């Protein structure tokens, strides 16, 4: 049991920490972009509303897939 606790308390290397923060940043970027596309009235790309919502939903789902992969690789 003490061996497991010792492994959990071990600090991450700076490279792993950097990649974790970069992954969180990319999750936040994709999620925020998806939300922005949904609520942006004058979206610069000429898309019908239903396609704009579909594109935003795709970005949000992709951001959550990245987040789950990030959490799984973090352990």
Image: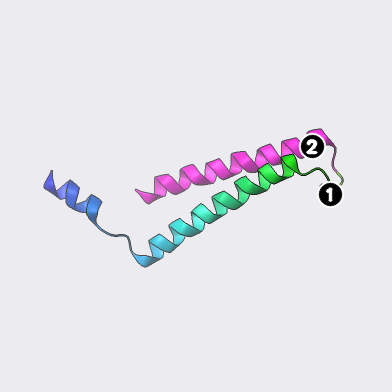
- Specify the farthest residue to the top: 50
Report whether 15 appears left or right of 35.
Answer: left
Q: Magenta stretch: give its range.
A: 47-75
- Relative height, residue 72 to residue 13 (above, below): above
Residue 12 is a magenta residue: no
Identified at 34% across, 48% down, the residue is: 75
Q: Is residue 2 left or right of residue 49?
A: left
Magenta segment's dominant SS is helix
Name the outermost residue toward the bottom. Answer: 14
Q: Position of residue 28 (x, y in %)?
A: 56, 50
Residue appearing at x 77%, y 39% in the figure: 52
Residue in the foreground of this view, choosing between 16 and 40: 40
Answer with left or right where residue 42 lies relative to residue 67: right
- Res. 51 mark: 2
- Residue 50 x %, y %: 80, 33
Residue 62, horizontal then vertical, whole percent: 60, 43
- Residue designated by label 1: 45
- Say what secondary structure mark 2 lies in: helix
Q: Quadrant of the N terminus?
A: top left
- Where is residue 24? Give x, y as percent: 50, 53
């Amino acid at each position: 049991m003490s061996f497991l606790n010792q492994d959990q308390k071990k600090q991450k290397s700076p490279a792993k920490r950097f990649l974790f923060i970069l992954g969180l940043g990319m999750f936040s970027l994709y999620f925020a972009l998806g939300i922005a596309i949904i609520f942006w009235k004058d979206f610069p790309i000429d898309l019908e509303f239903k396609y704009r919502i579909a594109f935003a939903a795709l970005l949000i789902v992709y951001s959550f897939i990245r987040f789950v992969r990030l959490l799984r690789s973090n352990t």
